[in-house]
Amino acid sequence: MAVAKTNSWYLQNGTRYPEPATKSQKTGIRDTKLFPDEDPGNDRILNQMMFIPSNYDSILKSKKVKTILAYNGFVYWWKIKKGEDVFKTFNCPVNTCQLTKNRSERQTADLVLFHDRYIHTKRRRPPKQLYALYHSESPAKTRPIRHPDKINWTITYRHDSIITTPYNKWVYYNPRIKQMEQSKNFAAHKTKKVAWFVSNCWPFNNRNQYAAELNQYIPVDIYGNCGTMHCPLSDEEKCHHILDDDYKFYLAFENANCKNYITEKFFTTGLGHDVIPIVMGSTPEDYEKYAPLRSFIHVDHFKSPKELAEYLHILDQNDDLYNSYFKWKGTGEFIPNWAYFWCRICALLHDDHTMSTKHWYKDINEWWRGPGICTKGSWRQA
């Protein structure tokens, strides 16, 4: 069955660009929900990517651009992208911004972007200037901010960030079609059970102990520094194709159990191959929000590794049940969200409501690493 595809600009071969936003007749504020307090519980990613300010024609005619100062980090951008190039490279609907790393522009930049850590100076900040903090790692691997009241925007994988940047985001072509029959038998010719590629043997959760106990009930082949199997990292593509050819399951275990923290271990190594990912990291609800329907198995759905292994043996013996975990294929696509966050920064900087009601974190450390954000064990016990 073919699935009718939308053609929004952020999808492959997409050509549909947004129209200028409409405003409420009562409040004068745009109808599009862009910020966490306007749409609690959702990431607003697609809203932000399909947002154009209602006065954008005037902005274009004025030829004024917003300046974003990447104060530290983002080294990989400077080789190919300067000024307005990054916004044009990604075909951003709102591209009247320029990117700079020149710290002498700190007093004139519209937004100062800090990577992983805030760098404080004694100079007074202009009243309309925004400070943004970007994190891609979990709180377990980031340092507390010494001046926790200085940050206006957050740019992280968390859905309650001002700009949410998960490692990937799944978008259905048609929200009403989330499953479709597959012509391929994904279990065919596979003789091995569970694989795990892992190099960090000192995580912030109990994934090593869990994998060791799981191995008592079903074979788990561990590749890398923490196991006995070897596949050279210099040939990563070949290593990962082992999953397509030999294994039925893959342990997509994160190095920390933190809310919303789901990395390439799941999206690229897991869902990027013909294998069922077994996940540990964020809550089951978070995976359901960011992943295709019925595409993974969460450890917290089982009381113990033994109970999980019993279910994996059932899947191993039942091709129809095993293949039911691949019916999401062909119903949508992943968008590289990390790339489009530049577009969304630029769009939000042109929102007049943004500047009139400046967002502010009273204590960024409390928001980022406060109680309940991470757990070392199961979320069932948190």
Image (cartoon, grey):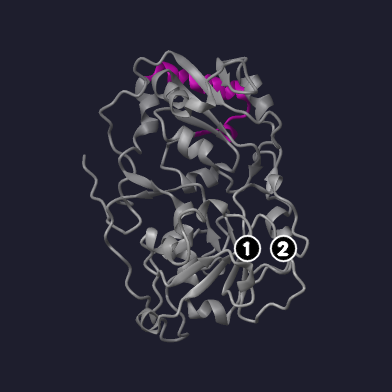
Is the residue marked by circle 1 packed among few (<14), some (14-19), or many (20+) residues within 10 Å? many
- Relative to residue 297, is residue 216 depicted above or below? above
Which residue does the numbered mark 1 point to in the structure image?
71
Q: Residue at x 67, y 67 (%)?
A: 151
Query: Residue 298's mark?
Result: none
Q: Nearer the viewer, residue 217 or 83?
A: 83
Across and down, in percent, residue 10 comes to 35, 56
- Relative to residue 101, is residue 281 depicted above or below? above
- The region drawn magenta spans 297-318
Across and down, in percent, residue 324 comes to 37, 30
- Relative to residue 281, is residue 154 depicted above or below? below
Q: Are the residues at dot 1 and dot 2 in contact (C-beta closer than 8 Å)?
A: yes
- Quadrant hosting residue 185: top left
Amino acid carrying label 2: it is Ile
Across and down, in percent, residue 176 comes to 31, 50
- Quadrant hosting residue 69: bottom right
Is the residue marked by circle 2 packed among few (<14), some (14-19), or many (20+) residues within 10 Å? few
Across and down, in percent, residue 218 comes to 55, 16
Tell whether 66 sits left or right of 55.
Answer: right
Specify whether residue 297 is in view.
Answer: yes
Q: Nearer the viewer, residue 192 or 107?
A: 107
- Quadrant hosting residue 300: top right
Let me know if residue 106 is in the magenta part.
no
Amino acid carrying label 1: it is Tyr
Q: Residue at x 33, y 46 (%)?
A: 332
Spatial CA distance of label 1 from label 2 is 8 Å
Which residue does the numbered mark 2 point to in the structure image?
119
Tell whether 313 sits left or right of 52.
Answer: right
Q: Nearer the viewer, residue 206 or 138?
A: 138
**Label 2 element class:** loop
Q: Residue at x 46, y 37 (%)?
A: 268
Tell whether 247 sits left or right of 4.
Answer: right
